[in-house]
Image: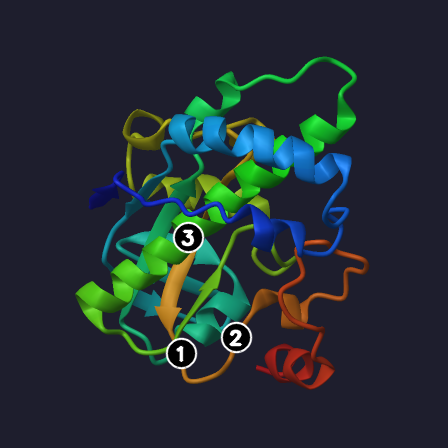
Amino acid sequence: MELLKDIPLELDVDALLDTPGMGGRNTAFEKALRSLVATVRSTARPKILYKVSYVDGRSDSQVTIDGVQFESGILSKNLRTVERVFPYVVTAGRELETITVEKGDMVRAFCLDALKERVLEEALRHFEQHIQRQFAPGTLAHMNPGSLKDWPISQQPALFSLFGDVEGFVGVRLKESHLMDPIKSVSGIYFPTEIDFKSCRLCTRHPCMKRRAPYDPELAANFRGS
């Protein structure tokens, strides 16, 4: 098991302003972002908890990793020829919860949330680069409990059990709903792949602000027929 804590943060405000939904430049959004970024950069302590794990067994609807059984036909198919995988929990850090905004200041609250999200994104990017440097797995894909009906969020405790005391290591706990606290956290499994797999390509949910790829009915049919 590995813990990564010294994660560099860029937090490029100009790039963030150019993303859809941020209100553009020369607006109240830009003013709020620029006033918050230094505080977020100095406060944030993102963390990455991961391990190198191995597939013990698989069936059409299940896969066993390090002795822990997961219920997911799609995950099982993705790991059909895979032996080594990288389970993880990545968080923007509980420290960011100490930053507050004045009640009713919706613009500043929105911008703070966007910066927290960017911290999480940069931590994930750092994690992917770390895996490539350390293990050279080739093309990577990942799945997250709750991102698809086939692998529901109720599988979170099984994933967390691979690590033991996740809250002690990185400050992330599971609520009764199986959502993570702090909310700017993500868990899942990275694995080598020969196809461009993204859970979004199997999901019909629309609209979705976090969509990373369009729905692919052909790919979805392929997984349903597996």
Q: Image height check: is 177 above or below 85? A: above
> Where is residue 67 shown, x and y percent of the image?
28, 53
Task: For the residues labelled 1 and 2, say whether their Cβ atoms are less than 8 Å apart.
Answer: yes
Looking at the rendered image, the quarter that the C terminus falls into is: bottom right
Q: Which mark is residue 124?
A: 3
Q: Amino acid at mark 3?
A: Leu
Task: For the residues labelled 3 and 2, say whether their Cβ atoms are less than 8 Å apart.
Answer: no
User: Is disc 1 placed on a helix, strand or loop?
Assistant: loop
- Residue at the image point whose x is 72% and y is 48% from the top: 25
Q: Earlier in the sequence, mark 3 or mark 1?
A: 3
Q: Amino acid at mark 1?
A: Thr
- Residue at the image point whose x is 56% and y is 42% from the top: 117
Q: Image height check: is 168 above or below 202? A: above
- Give the residue number, with chain letter if any, for mark 1: 193
Q: Is residue 201 visible?
A: yes
Q: Earlier in the sequence, mark 3 or mark 2?
A: 3
* Classed neighbour count for the residue bearing mark 1: other residues with Cα under 10 Å, few (<14), some (14–19), many (≥20): some
CA distance separating discs 3 and 1 = 18 Å
Colour scheme used in the picture?
Answer: rainbow
- Give the residue number, with chain letter if any, for mark 2: 197
Left or right of 223? Residue 132 is left
> Where is residue 4 shown, x and y percent of the image?
25, 43
Q: Give the label, 3 or 2, closer to the camera.
A: 3
Residue lying furthest front in this view?
26
CA distance separating discs 3 and 2 = 17 Å
- Residue at the image point whose x is 60% and y is 55% from the top: 147
